[in-house]
Image: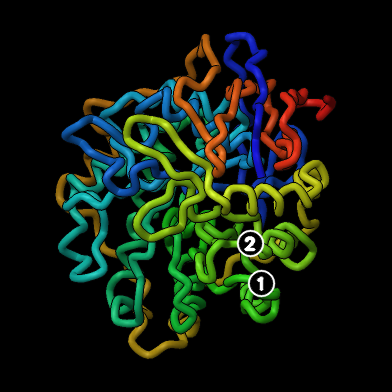
C-alpha cells in the first residue's frame, strides 16, 4: 500500500489549543462538549530508551524537526494521543508540544526514566524512594503542566512485574501517586491533571493491583493516593484472535465496575508477524468501549524488539513498515466522529474502601499504611522545585516535514506536512492515502475529506 502524497500545510501561525480533558468517574470528558474521549494512542519513543540521553540533551520531545515528521505521519494514521516514556525536564519542549497540540494529539507522560535514581525499582523499592527522585518527578510536572494537551502523568510503569514484587512495591507506587497529586494540587492552579499507574498484564496479581491503587483510603484527604486512572499493558490478543480467545472479555468483566478510567497503555502483540491489529474493532466497538477508554499501540519506532511501524535512522529519513498500513486500515473501519461523540454514563461506581479483604493473592501487600515522605521532600512539595521548568505553546511558522519519508516499497511521500487543526479539534482519520495502484498525486482536504 502506497502513499504517493500527503496533505499540504495550509494553516496560519496562530496558536490553537486542545481542550484540556477532565476525569469524571469511568471516563475522560471534554468539558466543552460533555462527550467522552476515547484514546487512539501511539507509544512514542524515537530511538527507544537511547532516545533519552541527558548528556546529549536529547529526549523524544526535544527535536522539532523529528516531531514534525512524526506528527504528520501520526495525523495521517488517525492518532489522537501519544505516550512518551522518558523525558528530561531540563530541556525545552515548547515546539514539540505545540506541534502535537496543533496536530490534535494529547500527551500521556511517564515521570520516570531508565536512568539510575529516576524511577522506583521493583527490587528493594524502599531504597529508590528519596527526595531527589521525587524532585525529578515534580520537575516533569512543572515542565509539562502548562501545555493544554498534557492529558495525564504515569506514576509508574510495570513496577509490579511478577508476583515476587508485590510484597512492598504497591505501597510505594501509591505513595508516589500521592506525592504527585499533592504537588499538582499545590502548584497547578488552572486545572487538575490526572495521575495513575501503568500496569503489566500479570493476571495472577492484576486484580489485586487494580484494587490496591483505586480504593478509597480512610484519612487520605481528597483521596490523594488513589489513582485517577488505571492503565494496562496487555499483549494477549495475538494475530487473528477474538474477543474471547484473547481473554479481553475477562478484562471487560473485571473492570466493569471501575471507579476511574481504564485503558490500554500498551497493546499490539507482534507474534505472528506482520501484525494485523484486529483487536482495534473490539477496543473501539461495543465489545469494550463502554468500559475501556481506548488504548495506546506499542510502538511507533522500530527497535530490536520488533514492535515498530516506522523504521528510521538517526539522520532523520524514515520508511513506513507494513504494520503501519495494517493499523491504518483497521482505523479506517472506525467511525471516529461517532466514537468521540459517546456520552458519559449516567452513573459510575464509587471507589470501594481500602481493606485487606480486597487482596486475594498470598504475599501481595495488604497493608495500606503508606511510606512517609523521605527527608527533604515535604519542603519540595511545599515550595516547588527549583529551578522550575516552564513550558508554553509557541507559534510554528512552517508545517512542512524536512526529512524524507518513504513508503515500504521505497517511493517517496511527497508534500508531507502537519495540518494544524482549529481550537479544540482532536485528530481523527480525515486522510485516506491512495492504494498501490493509484500513482497520481492526490490531495485531500483534511476537514471535509473531499478530493
Q: Nearest the camera: 301 or 30?
A: 301
Query: Which residue is found at the position 52% from the left and 9% from the top?
Result: 397
Residue 184 drawn at (x, y percent)? 41, 39
Res. 411 image quadrant:
top right
Q: Nearest the camera: 300 or 423?
A: 300
Mark 2: secondary structure:
loop
Where the N terminus falls, by quadrant?
A: top right
Residue 4 drawn at (x, y percent)? 65, 31
Label 1 environment density (alpha carbons within 10 Å; few <14, some 14–19, many ≥20): few
Residue 67 appears in view? yes
Q: Which callout, 1 or 2, points at the residue further toward the start of the chain?
A: 1
Query: Which residue is found at the position 66% from the left and 81% from the top?
Result: 245
- Using the image, determine if residue 57 lies above or below residue 243: above
Relative to residue 218, is residue 9 drawn left or right?
right
Residue holding disc 1: 240
Residue 107 drawn at (x, y percent)? 50, 39
Where the C terminus falls, by quadrant?
A: top right
Residue 216 drawn at (x, y percent)? 51, 65
Residue 24 appears in view? no
Res. 431 image quadrant:
top right
Count of numbered circles in the view: 2
- Using the image, determine if residue 103 lies above or below residue 320: above
- Using the image, determine if residue 204 lies above or below residue 411: below
Relative to residue 443, is residue 355 drawn left or right?
left
Relative to residue 342, is residue 95 drawn left or right?
left
Residue holding disc 2: 276
Mark 1: secondary structure:
loop
User: Residue 423: which disc?
Assistant: none
Amino acid at each position: 500500500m502506497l502513499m504517493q502524497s500527503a496533505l499540504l500545510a495550509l494553516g496560519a501561525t496562530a496558536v490553537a489549543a486542545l481542550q484540556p480533558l477532565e476525569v469524571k468517574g469511568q471516563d475522560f470528558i471534554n468539558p466543552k462538549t460533555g462527550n467522552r474521549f476515547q484514546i487512539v494512542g501511539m507509544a512514542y519513543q524515537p530511538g527507544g530508551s537511547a532516545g533519552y540521553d541527558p548528556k546529549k540533551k536529547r529526549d523524544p520531545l526535544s527535536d522539532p524537526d523529528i516531531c514534525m515528521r512524526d506528527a504528520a505521519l501520526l495525523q495521517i494514521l488517525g492518532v489522537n494521543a501519544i505516550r512518551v516514556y522518558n523525558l528530561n525536564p531540563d530541556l525545552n519542549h515548547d515546539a514539540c508540544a505545540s506541534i502535537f497540540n496543533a496536530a490534535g494529539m494529547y500527551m500521556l507522560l511517564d515521570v520516570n526514566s531508565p536512568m539510575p535514581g529516576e524511577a522506583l525499582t521493583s527490587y528493594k523499592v524502599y531504597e529508590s524512594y528519596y527526595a531527589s527522585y521525587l524532585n525529578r518527578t515534580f520537575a516533569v510536572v512543572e515542565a509539562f503542566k502548562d501545555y493544554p494537551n498534557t492529558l495525564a502523568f504515569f506514576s509508574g510503569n510495570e513496577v509490579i512485574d511478577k508476583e515476587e514484587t508485590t510484597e512492598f512495591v504497591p505501597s510505594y507506587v501509591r505513595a508516589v501517586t500521592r506525592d504527585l497529586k499533592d504537588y499538582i494540587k499545590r502548584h497547578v492552579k488552572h486545572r487538575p491533571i490526572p495521575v495513575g499507574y501503568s500496569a503489566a498484564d500479570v493476571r495472577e496479581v492484576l486484580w489485586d493491583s487494580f484494587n490496591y491503587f483505586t480504593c478509597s483510603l480512610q484519612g487520605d484527604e481528597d483521596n490523594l493516593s488513589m489513582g485517577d486512572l488505571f492503565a494496562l499493558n496487555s499483549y494477549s490478543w495475538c494475530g487473528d484472535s477474538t474477543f474471547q480467545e484473547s481473554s479481553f472479555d475477562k478484562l471487560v468483566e473485571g473492570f466493569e465496575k471501575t471507579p476511574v478510567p481504564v485503558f490500554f497503555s500498551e497493546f499490539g502483540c507482534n507474534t505472528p508477524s506482520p501484525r494485523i491489529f484486529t483487536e482495534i474493532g473490539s477496543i473501539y466497538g461495543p465489545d469494550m468501549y463502554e468500559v475501556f477508554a481506548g488504548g495506546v499501540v506499542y510502538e511507533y519506532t522500530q527497535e530490536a524488539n520488533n514492535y515498530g511501524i516506522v523504521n528510521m535512522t538517526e539522520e532523520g529519513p524514515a520508511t513506513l513498515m507494513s504494520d503501519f498500513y495494517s493499523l491504518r486500515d483497521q482505523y479506517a473501519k472506525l467511525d471516529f466522529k461517532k466514537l468521540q461523540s459517546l456520552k458519559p454514563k449516567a452513573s459510575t461506581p464509587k471507589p470501594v474502601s481500602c481493606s485487606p479483604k480486597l487482596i486475594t493473592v498470598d504475599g501481595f501487600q495488604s497493608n495500606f499504611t503508606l511510606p512517609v515522605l523521605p527527608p527533604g521532600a515535604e519542603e519540595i512539595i511545599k515550595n516547588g522545585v527549583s529551578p522550575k521548568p516552564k513550558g508554553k505553546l509557541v507559534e510554528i511558522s512552517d508545517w512542512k516535514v524536512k526529512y524524507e519519508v518513504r513508503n515500504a516499497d521505497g517511493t517517496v511521500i511527497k508534500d508531507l506536512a502537519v495540518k494544524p487543526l482549529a481550537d479544540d479539534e482532536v485528530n481523527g482519520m480525515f486522510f485516506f492515502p491512495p492504494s498501490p495502484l493509484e500513482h497520481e498525486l492526490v490531495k485531500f482536504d483534511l476537514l471535509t475529506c473531499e478530493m
